[in-house]
Image (spheres, grey):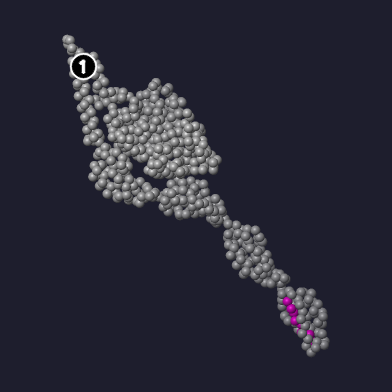
Amino acid sequence: MDATLSDPLVGRRIDGRYRVLARIGRGGMGVVYRAEDERLEREVAVKVLRADLAHDLEARQRFVREAKSAARLAHPGVVSVLDQGTDGETAYLVMELVGGRTLRDVVHERGLLTPGEALDVAEAVLDALAEAHRKGVLHRDVKPANVLVADDGRVKVADFGLARSAAATQGSTGGTGAELLGTAEYLAPERVARGVADARSDLYGVGVLLFEMLTGQPPFSGDSPVRLAYRHVYDEPPAPSSLVPGLPAELDAVVLKALAKDPDDRPRDAVDMLGDLRELHDRLTPAQLSARAATPAGSGAESGATVRLDLAAVQAAGAPDGTGDGVGDGGAAPASRAREEDVGYGPGGRRRRRSVVAMVVTLVVLAVAAGVAWFFLAGPGAFTTTPQVAGSTPGEARTTLATAGFAVEEREEFSDTVPAGTVIGTDPAAGRDVRKEGTVTVLVSRGIEQFPVPAVVGTARDDAERAVTDAGLTVGRVTEAFDEQVPDGSVVGTTPAVGVLANHDSPVDLVVSRGREPIPVPEVVGRTLDEARTAITDAGLVPGEPEAETSETAPAGQVLDQAPQSGTLFRGDTVRLTVSSGPPLVVIPRVQGQQVAAARSVLEGLGFRVSVQNVLGGIFGTVRDCSPAAGTSAPKGSTVTLTVV
């Protein structure tokens, strides 16, 4: 029956949002489905924790923790983590759905890649690993099945950090040795021999990846995962050119350096190896880069199977007498070589020879068995359990582990829950089987990982958000505000402020400029000059130097006009004012000696008001004097008083 049809999750909605459409893969820790995000109307990939791990609290916690680690990797070469959560007993992780094929499918369908194609893929993988290693995330399962080639040719790496989670959640199956989770063809020697890994272990996987792209098969093969893992530890890998003649010697050197048994002999980190590959890419000629060889006869293909390896069995595998050819012979035991023709003299000689051979073989087998038993039960190959030291100080943890017979190393890691300076745990974890006199790494908390808020003031909003994300932080609330100096669309400020150390999971709020603030122009016509100046200043504008203009209707000091009269200006702009200087001045004519009627007519004709004061009854009607005096100037409309006798 089709697995999709029988899968109970197909057709179900996870968390009321993700409708599961089909099952598309299964890994060591979870099952991957194609689903529709009904809220955003897009297709996504949903990875669900395996049902047999659903009730394992440690497995769920690690699944969540590693999902969060992977979500921090904002890199175009990494399959993006979009969401994470639980729905009842279902723990899930939502990732982008990459249309295309795995690198394993590409190699199987196309055969060998050209050196140029192989270098392009490896460089893309290393670019993604460099970002991951910078943020403290190991992949631990670099293989063609975890490298996706999108339909548009982009290369993306999947399952960052989840291999580590899976290894930490697998329990013992009753064997004598510690166990690993991984694909046997791609395990670094230190993972097999000591159960430890660092960034250089991922580089070993890239070396195997390159080898397989160039030759069509991994560097080692074996009739069992145990034998295959043994060869990673003890056998030297062949040069790619020994399987595909014509490959450049420089390409051999880069691949074999990545496949070095001792991690110290490999490149320091993904950035270092990426530099080596790019330098080699530039040195090779176009003909060397584009050369495509035929697939070697008998070339293998990655099994893609995730297997569990017993370390003790790995150490015991192989040919104890050293007679194996080292290339997939399975390490034949000496007894298998006792089938040479027996030689005897006289009747019964053949039977006696066979008896002697059988006895010798039996003794050898017993001796080997006794040696193996001693090695794994009492000798260096014996295993013991890692003690619990989480929550103690580093000194206390060292003492406890040293008393238990372990060599102790120390490594600092960030933790959102464990205070700085306190032991988070150990690698291998407490309760796991570790070889006697082996090395246990104490993981000491550095506290919550913090990053400085980047300098984004004055940059465009999109660039600022990208800078915040690249700095390891998240973008919080984005608000807008007017600003007189910062252009529209650029960042005015941040909370926390630029340069402040912020927790990696705390948001950085951005204030984005709306440009200069438009200010409505106040209407001040008819007001006094002082009132107009106050209103304009209070609005954030500047009153201009007033222009005086006479007015027969407006008193002196009153605003007659403004420019502009309405609309908006920006802060600091000027409003021009026209202010009344009062009515115009008119010279008072000489009217003394004139009859009062004539004088009144002249003065009123000039715009004056006339007031008459009679002396002795004004019986003659003659103007004797005027005030203001004749020849002086007075405002038009003012009153001239005539004295009449």
The secondary structure type at the circle numbered 1 is: helix
Amino acid type, residue under disc 1 in the picture: Arg
Q: Which residue is mark 1?
A: 354
Q: Which residues are magenta?
A: 638-645
| Residue at the left extreme, as displayed | 346
Q: Is residue 480 left or right of residue 148?
A: right
User: Does the image show residue 141?
Assistant: yes
Residue 640 falls inside the magenta stretch? yes
Residue drawn at x 74%, y 78% is: 639
Q: Nearer the viewer, residue 609 or 335?
A: 335
Q: Is residue 299 left or right of residue 356?
A: right
Q: Nearer the viewer, residue 244 or 427?
A: 427
Q: Does 106 appear above or below 137? A: above
- Residue 160 lies in quadrant: top left
Q: Is residue 49 left or right of residue 606?
A: left
Q: Nearer the viewer, residue 236 or 169?
A: 169
Residue drawn at x 31%, y 33% is: 310
| Residue 372: percent from left, percent from top | 24, 30
- Disc 1 crowd, CA 10 A, few/some/many (<14, 14-19, 20+): some
| Residue 451: percent from left, percent from top | 41, 49
| Residue 550: percent from left, percent from top | 70, 69
Residue 344 falls inside the magenta stretch? no
Q: How many marks?
A: 1
**Main secondary structure found in the magenta portion:** strand
**Quarter the C terminus occupies:** bottom right
| Residue at the top extreme, as displayed | 346
